[in-house]
Amino acid sequence: MQLKEVDVVENISPEEFKTKYYNTRTPLVIRGLAKQWPAYKKWNWDYFKEAVGSKEVGIYNNIKSDAYTPINKADDYIKFGDYIDMIRKGPAQWRIFLFNIFSHAPQLSKDFIWPVHLMKGFVKRAPMLFTGGEGAVTHMHFDIDLSHILHTQFIGRKRILLFPYEEQHKLYRKPYEVLSLADYTNYYVEEKSKLDLQKFPAIDKAEGFETILEHGDTLYMPAAYWHHMEYLESGFAMSLRALNNSFSGKMKGVWNIVGMRNIDTLMKKYRPKEWYEWKHKKIFENAAKELV
């Protein structure tokens, strides 16, 4: 992989952000944005446990999905307070994603400020919490609706690998899905890495970025960016989504949700073996073109 460090700034003007990052679809880490929010000091495990500890949530392990796995199906269910107790004790490869904690505890929405000075089109009904124990992995994918994301880390450190959408075939994208066939877990530690470059040689040509987020860091992730995340320590983050600013991007996001995903779901249900074999063939055909 050909990787560069994501640019890091303490703060940035709206004009510079739009010119250098938003308009060019370039990721950026802003360290000072969340430091202005009450959440920066207030949000911790005890605060969340008191607010929504009794709510049952779906939790996910590190096992990659296969041809028979339903989209976003939880691997287990647990009360949020019990989950917090579990991951606070040490390594626990369980994570929660797309948890709208604000629907259960609306008072938490007063703890941060929507950064409308940086971009427009925020989906204000759906700020989402992402939580993981040390060692938890969010496997390589891109967000299906193609939104811009501001992802702010609270507690713990998280390593993130990023690629532009155009690198999709070098990353071995599964047709009709937002996922990669390859496993990037521990890609940065040779003796622990699950990344098989002999099987997936095109990955070595992929050009992307990497960074480590710490408490209070906000990552701007441009629309359709591929991302792989690993929790170096137990922690949580909040994502604020803004709609794709191009008409074609919005329409493609709609197609992904109502067309692409439904086709994939139906084929997995009725012709899983044939569907998997066709996908597998197309994945490596597309990658071979990139190698040429």
Image (spheres, grey):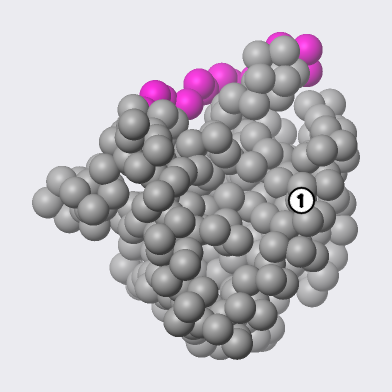
Residue 91: where, in percent of width, then height? Answer: 31, 68
Packing grade of label 1 (10 A; few <14, some 14-19, many >=20) is many
Q: Nearer the viewer, residue 245 or 153?
A: 245
Q: Is residue 229 above or below residue 289?
A: below
Identified at 57% across, 29% down, the residue is 27
Which quadrant of the rendered structure holds the N terminus? top left
Quarter residue 22 falls in: top right
Residue 68: where, in percent of width, then height? Answer: 49, 82
Tell me how many marks there are: 1
Start-end of magenta stretch: 3-16
Left/right placement of residue 86 relative to residue 79 reads left
Q: Nearer the viewer, residue 170 or 37?
A: 170
| Residue type (three-letter) at the residue carrying disc 1 | Gly
Residue 245: where, in percent of width, then height? Answer: 83, 34
Q: Would residue 31 be visible to someone looking at this image? A: no
Q: Is residue 154 above or below residue 69?
A: above
Magenta highlight on residue 8: yes
Identified at 19% across, 49% down, the residue is 198
Residue 72: where, in percent of width, then height? Answer: 60, 74
Quarter residue 282 falls in: bottom left
Left/right placement of residue 6 relative to residue 43 reads left
Q: Nearer the viewer, residue 201 or 160?
A: 201
Residue picked out by circle 1: 253
